[in-house]
Amino acid sequence: MLDTSIFATTETTVRVTKRGYQIWIEGDKLANAGFNIGARYDIEMTENQIVITSNPNGKKKVSKGLKAGIHRPIIDLHNKKIGQHFAPNSRVIASFEQSIITIRSI
């Protein structure tokens, strides 16, 4: 049985780009939740939240970024569907559990 207690949270902004809407998450919180560089995951969008679940056969993959010479994991959610669930430029909170990230409006 997985431990599903929240151990970290972070706030970010839903950005509007030419390609749609973007939610960007990066760094140690991802790795600590099991979302290391190259790990695969799935996304489920519902009316009031986005749930990202670790899945070895997932459709999406954690990207690799470089900051100050250090590699870090990045999840870049970037599509028009995000705008169906969150307002442009709104603040959201990402809650990190082992193998699960939940994004909700603040």
Image (spheres, rainbow, N blue to C red):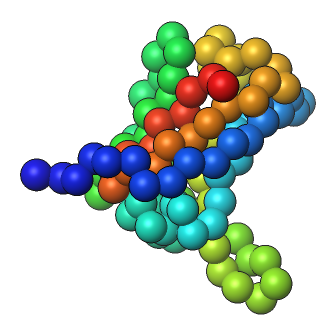
Residue 12 rendering spot, x and y as whole percentages: 73, 41
Q: Residue furthest left?
A: 1
Nearest to the observer: residue 94 or residue 74: 94
The residue located at (47%, 36%) in the rendering is: 102
Residue 98 occupies which quadrant of the picture?
A: bottom left
- Residue 36 lies, with reference to residue 102, above or below; the image says below
Q: Is residue 52 left or right of residue 13?
A: left
Q: Quadrant of residue 7?
A: bottom left
Vertical side of 98 occupied by 50: above or below: above
In percent of the image, x 76 and y 16: which residue is there?
87
Query: In the picture provided, is 62 more to the left or to the right than 74?
Result: left
Is residue 7 visible in the rendered structure shown here?
Answer: yes
x, y percent for residue 74: 63, 60
Quadrant assignment for the C terminus: top right
What residue do we see at 77% from left, 88% from top?
69
The spot of residue 11 in percent (x, y) is 69, 42
| Residue 23 figure quarter | top right
Number of numbered discs on residues: 0
Q: Which residue is situated farthest in the right direction here? A: 18
Residue 40 visible in this rendered orientation of the protein: no
* Rendered residue at 78%/24% (across/down): 90
Return the x and y of residue 61 as percentages of the image width and height.
49, 56
